[in-house]
Amino acid sequence: MGNQGYALQQNEVVILKSEEVYHEKINIDELLLTNLNIIAVSSKGVFKKQINVQYFPIDQIKIFNGKAWAIIPEEDECLEIYFLNGQETFEFGSKKEAIKWADNINSLLAGERMVVKCTKCEASITGIRDHVVCCQYCDSEQRL
C-alpha cells in the first residue's frame, strides 16, 4: 500500500510495519509503529479509495514500573495497549507478531520520560531523555 493516506512528521521514522491486522473488528491494511505514533491505515469501498488513518501517539501510552502497558493476554494473538485516555486492541495473525510489537513499544518507551518547555515558544514538550523531539506548536527540534 505504501504511504498512501498518511504523512510522517519531519522527525518521524517507521520502526515496524504489519499488514492485515484487526482493530475493533475492522481490517487494517497497514499498522505502523514509528518513534512518535502507532498509525493504523484502512481503506473502504470497491476500489479501496476511501482511506481512513488513525494516529495513536506513543507518548500517551501508560507506563507502570518502567514498562509500557502494551500487553498480550495469555493464549492470544492480540496486543492490548493502554493509553492515558483509553485502551486499544490490535489482533495480529500470530502471537509472535504481537510479541514483536510489544517488545518494540517497550524498547521505544524504556527511556526516562521528561516534560520540558520548548526553547523557542515555551510550550510543554513530552518525550524521552536523549531523544530529539519536535514541538507540535512551532516545529522546532530539540534534544531532551
Image (spheres, grey):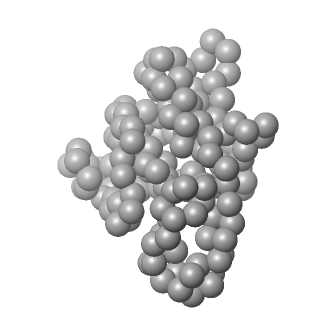
Quarter of the image that includes the C terminus: bottom right
Would residue 51 be found to the left or right of residue 133 on screen? Answer: left
Q: Quadrant of residue 4?
A: bottom left
Residue drawn at (45%, 72%) of the image: 141
How many badges with numbers are in the image?
0
Whether residue 134 is visible to the viewer of this picture, yes or no, is yes
Closest to the observer, 121 or 37: 121
Where residue 71 sits in the image (x, y, percent)?
66, 29
Closest to the observer, 99 or 123: 123
Where residue 88 sits in the image (x, y, percent)?
62, 43
Where residue 57 sits in the image (x, y, percent)?
55, 56
Would residue 48 be found to the left or right of residue 23 on screen? Answer: left
User: Residue reaching furthest right?
Assistant: 65
User: Residue reaching furthest bottom?
Assistant: 121
Q: Quadrant of residue 113?
A: bottom right
Where residue 92 sits in the image (x, y, percent)?
47, 26
Residue drawn at (54%, 29%) of the image: 103
User: Residue reaching furthest top?
Assistant: 75
Compared with 15, 56 (above or below) is below
Closest to the observer, 123 or 45: 123
Closest to the observer, 63 or 17: 63
Whether residue 87 is visible to the viewer of this picture, yes or no, is no
Residue drawn at (34%, 34%) of the image: 19
Quarter of the image that includes the N terminus: top left
Residue drawn at (43%, 33%) of the image: 21
Compared with 88, 131 (above or below) is below
